[in-house]
Amino acid sequence: MSIPTPSHTTPCRICGGAVERFLDLGDQPLSDAFRKPDETDDEFFFRLEVGRCTGCTMTQLLHEVPRERMFHADYPYRSSGSTTMAAHFRAIARRFIAEELTGSDPFIVEIGSNDGVMLRTVAEAGVRHLGVDPSAGVGLTAQEQGVRVRTDFFEERSALEVVADEGRADVIYAANTFCHIPYLDSVLAGARALLGDDGIFVFEDPYIGDILRRRSFDQIYDEHFYFFSATSVGAMAAQHGFELVDVERLDVHGGEVRYTLARPGRRTVTQAVHDLLLEESTSGLDRAEPYESFARAVMAIRDDLRSTLERLRDEGRRVVGYGATAKSATVNNFCGIDRDLVAVVYDTTEEKQGRVTPGQHIPVEDMSGFATDPAPIALLYAWNHAEEIKRKEQAFADRGGRWLTYVPEVRLD
Ligand code: SAH
Ligand code: TYD
Ligand code: ZN
């Protein structure tokens, strides 16, 4: 079935250049819209196409979903669902406290503070902080842990309000959030106003180099609007009165980079920045070829995953899903995976349980079912947490259970 293609190029949201589409993942629902089984009418769909700017190289979606549709009181994602991630955020909080928040009355602002997974360490240390997050439900959980939250979208307007109320910040931090925001010009204008002269703006997001290498096409969904590289971030920073002064590769969520911006000339640019820029130009991240070969590989994964699941069904082998990730919306809806191929998805998040997955309406159930489910095969949608999950689910392997994964290729372990 071929789907009509609405557009091939759009203007770059960062530099105005031409964004050339390299992959069309079809019509997709909101990745975090887990509805009640009897409330699946009038589901919202949008066209998920991704392209690369031939000017500044920024990889980005071609169509924007209105932010209020994604981030609201019932937004279900909870950052504390992974112990590995909780430890990761504790570590960066401690680093900020030790190295950056050392003045007489330091102040840190987090954009996208979610359930307070990072800021609770800051709060426990008695350091002045503020989380800005539009999703009221996650904010409530954060507040219960002693974290101060402002339920709002971060942009120039709200940043100016924060400066007026609380003064300038030593650190602005955003994990898995900056890449969610199409209007980065406004966010950077806000950061310019909010950040102290020697402050740093640190953000970490999935790295396009790792996505291409690991073929992790499921990182592409409504909330992930941009896919950063040192090259594209460096260009964007310069355009908005910042300098990219440090980068750090992170082994979480399938490969991320933590970028540090500062006002120009205030911090020394580390060797790591030069090294990553060089690596990116050597591997051709500024050319079309790696994106085109990624797209070809993704089509092959789709065909392989679908035929594998159909074969398993025809052999009468039950397959269940593990982890109702946002990423899985792309996989299920792009590959056409419904309840006929994956019977149920198990997930630890209370807010997703008793609901159905976006688009394909596979039931989501709590983990107690996984322990007793006789299914011999689990499709690991939360592959980015494979180590943590496989450690925890040793009993599944002990009874002969096998994990099915699809990046970088379809594998039954
Ligand atoms: N930092 C956490 C949460 C990531 S989920 C982590 O790394 O696990 C993304 C979060 O960003 C959500 O809680 C969402 O509500 C929030 N968000 C989305 N758009 C935002 C914006 N414009 N300003 C602030 N937060 C935003
Ligand atoms: P994650 O991969 O962090 O993000 P995204 O939704 O952005 O793709 O989501 C992990 C999901 O998997 C989340 O719904 C919680 C669930 N999960 C489990 O059910 N068990 C686990 O052990 C872990 C680590 C996650
Ligand atoms: Zn551009």
Image (cartoon, rainbow, N blue to C red):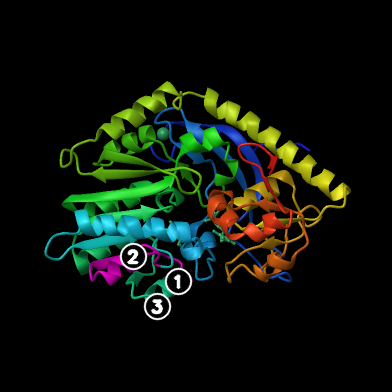
CA distance separating discs 3 and 2? 12 Å
Residue at (57% x, 51% y) in the render: 386
Q: Residue 144 carries which label?
A: 3
Q: Name the residue under label 2.
A: 119
**Span highlighted in magenta in the image:** 116-138
Q: Residue 405 carries which label?
A: none
Q: Name the image quarter holding the C terminus.
A: top right
Q: Name the image quarter holding the N terminus.
A: top right
Q: Can residue 11 be seen in this view?
A: no
CA distance separating discs 1 and 3? 12 Å
Q: Mark 1 points at which residue?
A: 136
First in residue order: circle 2 vs circle 1: 2
Q: Which residue is nearer to you in this view: 337 or 83?
A: 83
Q: Position of residue 333 (x, y in %)?
A: 69, 49
Q: In which quarter of the image is ligand 1?
A: bottom left
Front position among marks 1 and 3? 3
Quadrant of residue 130 within the rendered picture: bottom left
First in residue order: circle 1 vs circle 3: 1
First in residue order: circle 3 vs circle 2: 2
Quadrant of residue 272 within the rendered picture: top left
> Tag 3's secondary structure?
helix
Type of residue at label 3? Glu
> Tag 1's secondary structure?
helix
Image check: 283 left or right of 94? Answer: right
Q: Position of residue 254 (x, y in %)?
A: 51, 44
